[in-house]
Image (tube, grey):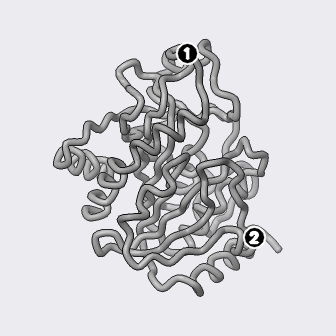
């Protein structure tokens, strides 16, 4: 069975178990999976472990399920958790959930992640809109056979992060008195955190944030014609800017930020 046949079977299985057909999807990252739980009405959920051919995340803070329901009366599909390249799975598994979202009818995608702050003006707990990215993973998730049904061989990433969605987020943030930062996100392969020398080099290259996700999904979403909005939760200052880095700190800060992020995303859903 080829890639497309597997994606179609996964998609059909999910469609048969969910009532709504939303065009707005979400990907909630490290420690942020439960951000929208209290804000979604009429929730229906499916676990990835039950979906044919679906990969499963192995990292703490990533649930691995889809939840469908309404937020501010708008139908949404929430992806709780993600697959990271450092987990050892091939690219086709890392980007599999995004392609399934596309086949389910998603047209706009809101993503969140936990990130280290390279910009010296960023503090733990800040929320930052991603304006652009640097792919420092050393690879590209679209390498190999192109699935023409999703998009072209050479997709354009000039506007990888949709300007209209970002403007809507800024407007909502101002109304809610949320100090939204904006910056360039760089993806490294992980799972080790970066060295202070690497952070210094990445700052010179123009990066404001660093993490181990989001870029593959953004590339895949753009390839498939989805509009992307991505929000980073700054969970720590990057290597060399604080004493040490731990995943426990990441989860602790995201837990504190969940309420504010949930309020922001709910407002954005009402605008787009």
Regarding residue 246, the answer to whether it shows in the image is yes
Residue 24 pos. (x, y %): 41, 67
Alpha carbons under labels 2 and 1: distance apart: 42 Å
Residue 205 pos. (x, y %): 51, 20
Hey, which quadrant is residue 199 in on the image? top right
**Position of 45 relative to 36 (above/below):** below
Q: Which residue is mark 2?
A: 53
Residue 177 pos. (x, y %): 19, 42
Q: Mark 2 or mark 1: which is in front?
A: 1
The one nearer the camera, 9 or 69, is 69
**Position of 192 relative to 228 (above/below):** above
In this rendering, position of residue 42 left or right of residue 73: right
Residue depicted at 49% across the width and 61% down the height: 225
Residue depicted at 48% across the width and 34% down the height: 185
How crowded pointer 2 is (Cα within 10 Å; few <14, some 14-19, many 20+) is rated as some
**What is the residue that sits farthest to the right in this orientation?**
1
Q: Which residue is mark 1?
A: 243
The tally of labels here is: 2
Query: Which secondary structure, mark 2?
Result: loop
Say the numbered circle drawn on residue 182: none
Quadrant in which the C terminus appears: bottom left
Hey, which quadrant is residue 5 in on the image? bottom right
Residue 85 pos. (x, y %): 70, 45
Residue depicted at 34% across the width and 35% down the height: 182
Query: Which secondary structure, mark 1?
Result: loop
How crowded pointer 1 is (Cα within 10 Å; few <14, some 14-19, many 20+) is rated as few
In this rendering, position of residue 197 left or right of residue 89: left
Hey, which quadrant is residue 196 in on the image? top right
């Amino acid at each position: 069975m080829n890639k497309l046949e597997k994606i179609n079977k996964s998609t059909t299985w999910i469609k048969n178990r969910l009532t709504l057909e939303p065009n707005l999807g979400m990907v909630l990252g490290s420690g942020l999976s439960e951000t929208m739980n209290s804000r979604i009405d009429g929730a229906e959920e499916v676990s990835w472990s039950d979906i044919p051919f679906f990969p499963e995340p192995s990292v703490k803070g990533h649930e691995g399920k889809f939840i469908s329901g309404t937020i501010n009366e708008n139908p949404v599909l929430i992806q709780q958790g993600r697959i990271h390249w450092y987990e050892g799975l091939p690219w086709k598994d890392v980007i599999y959930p995004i392609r399934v979202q596309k086949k389910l009818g998603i047209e706009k995608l809101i993503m969140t992640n936990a990130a280290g702050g390279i910009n010296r003006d960023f503090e733990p707990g800040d929320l930052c809109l991603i304006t652009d990215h640097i792919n420092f993973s050393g690879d590209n998730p679209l390498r190999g056979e192109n699935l023409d049904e999703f998009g072209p061989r050479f997709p354009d990433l000039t506007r990888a992060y949709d300007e209209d969605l970002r403007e809507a987020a800024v407007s909502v943030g101002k109304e809610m008195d949320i100090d939204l930062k904006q910056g360039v996100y760089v993806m490294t392969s992980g799972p080790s955190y970066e060295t202070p020398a690497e952070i210094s080099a990445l700052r010179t290259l123009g990066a404001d944030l660093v993490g181990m996700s989001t870029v593959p999904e953004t590339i895949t979403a753009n390839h498939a014609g989805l509009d992307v909005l991505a929000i980073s939760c700054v969970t720590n200052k990057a290597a060399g800017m604080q004493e040490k880095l731990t995943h426990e700190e990441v989860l602790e800060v995201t837990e504190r930020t969940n309420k504010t992020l949930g309020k922001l995303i709910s407002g954005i859903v009402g605008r787009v």
